Amino acid sequence: METLQKITLIFTIIGAINWGLIGFFNFNLVESLFTSSSPIPNIIYAIVGICGLINIGLLFAKFGENEK
């Protein structure tokens, strides 16, 4: 489960960076890499959203639970 959370955290960070670029510079990195007529940006947004939902579990995880 730890590997899945690390992967989803990476996607969530990428999404946060994209939102930061939109907010500060009005530049959408995802749509600049892929054409807006393509379904790929929507798929990327959906993956980042699902990863964000999975990472909610990190808020409720007990830190150090698996440490010896």
Image (cartoon, rainbow, N blue to C red):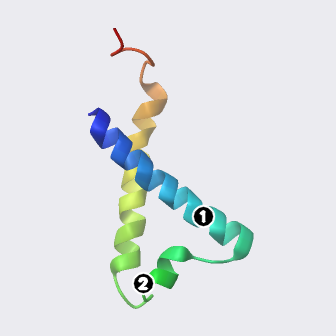
Badge 1: residue crowd in 10 Å (few <14, some 14–19, many ≥20): some
Displayed quadrant of residue 46: bottom left
* Disc 2 residue type (three-letter): Phe
Displayed quadrant of residue 4: top left
Q: CA distance from mark 1 to mark 2?
A: 16 Å
Q: Quadrant of the N terminus?
A: top left
Position in image of residue 48 (x %, y %): 41, 59
Q: Residue at x 34, y 82 (%)?
A: 39
> How many numbered circles does the render carry?
2
> Sequence-wise, which precedes: disc 1 or disc 2?
1
* Vertical order, 2 against 43 (above or below): above
Could you tell whether 55 is left or right of 23 in the image?
Answer: left
Which residue carries the number 1 mark? 19
Instruction: Say what secondary structure mark 1 lies in.
Output: helix
Which residue carries the number 2 mark? 34
Instruction: Say what secondary structure mark 2 lies in.
Output: loop
Specify the farthest residue to the right. Answer: 24
Label 1 with label 2: CB-CB less than 8 Å: no
Badge 2: residue crowd in 10 Å (few <14, some 14–19, many ≥20): few
Position in image of residue 47 (x %, y %): 35, 61
Q: Which mark is residue 50?
A: none
Specify the farthest residue to the front. Answer: 68
Could you tell whether 43 is left or right of 17 in the image?
Answer: left
* Disc 1 residue type (three-letter): Trp
